Image (tube, rainbow, N blue to C red):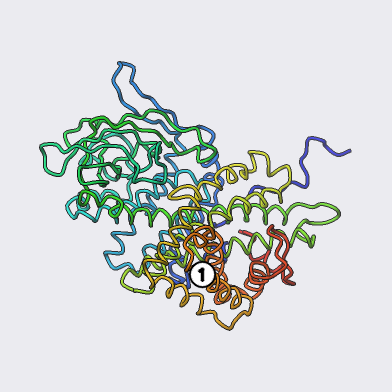
Amino acid sequence: MSDLRAATNQTPPLIGHNVVTSDAALTEAVTRYGSADLVEELAPLGAEAGTAEAREHGRLANRHHPELTTYDRFGNRIDEVEFHPSWHWLMERAVGHGLQAAPWEQQDGGDAHAHLRRAAGFFAWSQTEPGHGCPISMTYAAVPALRADDAIAKEWTPLLAARSYDPGVRPRTEKLGALAGMGMTEKQGGSDVRANQTRALPTAEDGWYTLHGHKWFTSAPMNDVFLVLAQAEGGMTCFVVPRVLADGTRNRIDVVRLKDKLGNRSNASSELELDGTLAQRLGDEGRGVRTIIDMVAATRLDCVLGSASLMRHALAEASWHVAHRSAFGGPLVDKPLMQNVVADLAVESEAATALAMRLASAVDRPGDPHEVALRRIALPLAKFWVCKRTPAMVAEALECLGGNGYVEDSGLPLLFRESPLNSIWEGSGNVNALDVLRALGREPEVLQAWITEVGAARGADSRLDRAVDDTLALLGEGMGDSGALESGARLLAGRMAACLQGSLLVRFAPAEVADAFCSSRFGTSYGGTFGMLTSGSLREIVDRATPWG
C-alpha cells in the first residue's frame, strides 16, 4: 500500500539554475550587443539569482511588509520605515552588482556596454523579487537628471554609483552609498504633473527653497535623496530634497501613510507631506519637466526590463512545470496543446527580451543619432506594449500550473499581482501612446529611425513586411485628423512595437521562433489569446525556453 503522505508527480522547485546562462534569448542578445565575455561576467549574478536562498529571501520580503513608525518611544517625529532583513539582503546584492547608478560612472570611464550589462543584470536579478527593483531603478534614473547642475551631480553621483548598500538616516557625508527616489505625482493631478500644487518658496540661501504640499506617491521613502517637482514663481521646477541636511538634522519629510497596494508589497510606497521641507533647485525655474525628463526615460526602460523579467520568470516556472508534471498518461510537455501554449508564452517572452536589450544597447551609444532617435520613439512604444502584454502572459503561465499556480507557495500569485504595475508606473498606457504621437509630430527623425530599424529585416518575412506597410498606412491615414489619430494611438503604438519585435526576431532569433511570432502576431488567424500557434516546431521552442540548469 502506498504512503498517502508521500507526494508524487509534483514538480520540484525551480532552484539551482543560472538565471542568466539558462536564458538563451538573454545570452544571445547580450552577446549580440556586447560580447560573450559579458555573459560570463553576468554568470555569477545569474547563479545567485537561481539559488534556493534567493528565492526564500524574495518570499520573506513579500510576506513581511514594510512598517511605518511615525514617532519614536519618546515622542520624537522620525518617519522611518522598517524592512524585513530579507529586503536588505536583496538590496545589498542588487547594489553590490552595480544595478543602480554604477553604469553612469562606468560609461564615463570607457565601458562601452555599461548600460547593457546593467540592464541584463537588472532583468535577471529582478526574478528573485521584483519589488526591491523600485529604489534600484529610481537611483539609476536620477543621475542623468542630476546632471542639470554640475555641482549637485558631483556631490551625489559618487554615492549613488557606489556599490555599497548603506541604509540608515544619516547625512550624505557619513554614508558609503546612497539611493534616490522621486516625488512627482499629487492627488489632484496624477500623470498631469503640471497640475501639481506643491509650492516652492525661496530662502535667503541662493538656490534653496522650502516646499509646501502633499505628494501622493513616493516610493522608498527611506532613500537618501529625492527629485521633486513643485511650483516656483517661475513655474514648475525640479528640486533635490535630501532626507538629512548637511548639519545632521532630519529634513521635514512627513510620511503620512504607506500605500496598501495590489502588489509590489515588499516595497514601501508612501504619501508625503512637505511643510517647510528644504530643497535645492535643480535647473532653472519653470524647466522642471524638462529637467526630470531624462529620469522618466530611464525609469521607462526599467519598466520594460521589469515586465520582460516577469515574463521570463513566469515562463520559466511554466516550462519547468510541464517538463516535470504528468497528466493523462504522459508528461505535460508532450501534449500538443500544452506545447502550443508554452511555446506561445516563450515567443512572447523572447520578443520582450529582445526589444528590452535592444533599447539598453541604445543607451550605450548616446552619440549615435540613429540610436538616440530610436530610443526616443521605441521607449514609449515598448513601455506601452510590453507592459500591456505582461498581465495576460503571466496569467496564462499561472494557469499552466493549474491549481498549484493559484497557491501562494508557487510564487506565481506574486508575479500576477506585480504584472500590471509597470504599465501604470511612469505613465499609463494612454500616456505612453500619446507620447508616441508627440514624438512623431515633433521629431521627424524618430519615424525614420523606426523605419530604418524595422527595414533591416525587409524581405525576410512577407508577413512582417505587410505589417510594416499597414502600420505606415495607418499612420498616414491619421495624420490629417488629430482626433482620429489620438483615438487610435493605442492601435498605432501596439503595431509599431510589434513590428520592432518582429524585426528583431526575424533577424536574430531561431527560425522557428521568428516564424511563430510573425504567423501569430501578424497573421489573420490570431485569436488574441495564447496557444493558437500554427508553427510545426513547437517542441523546439519549448525546449529552448526551459531552464534546465
Is residue 302 among the parts visible in the rendering?
yes
Give neighbour class at mark 1: few <14, some 14-19, many 20+ (Cα, 10 Å). some
In the picture, which quadrant includes the N terminus?
Answer: top right
Q: Residue at x 85, y 53 (%)?
A: 328
Whole-percent x, y for residue 34 in the image: 43, 70
Whole-percent x, y for residue 30 in the image: 47, 68
Whether residue 204 sits left or right of residue 172 in the image: it is left
In the image, residue 228 sits, relative to residue 442, either above or below, namely above
**Circle 1 residue:** 475
In the image, residue 384 sits, relative to residue 83, either above or below, namely below
Whether residue 429 sits left or right of residue 153 in the image: it is right
Is residue 45 among the parts visible in the rendering?
no
Whole-percent x, y for residue 356 in the image: 48, 62
Whole-percent x, y for residue 21 in the image: 54, 63
Whether residue 339 sits left or right of residue 277 in the image: it is right
Q: Which of 87 and 440 is in front in this view?
A: 440
Secondary element at image label 1: helix
Tell me the quarter of the picture where residue 350 sits. bottom right
Q: Which of 295 and 81 is in front in this view?
A: 295
- Pick out the residue farthest to the top: 74
Q: Which residue is drawn at 65% across and 49% down?
A: 395
Residue type at mark 1?
Leu
In the image, residue 426 sits, relative to residue 250, either above or below, namely below
Tell me the quarter of the picture where residue 514 sits. bottom right
In the image, residue 506 sits, relative to residue 120, either above or below, namely below
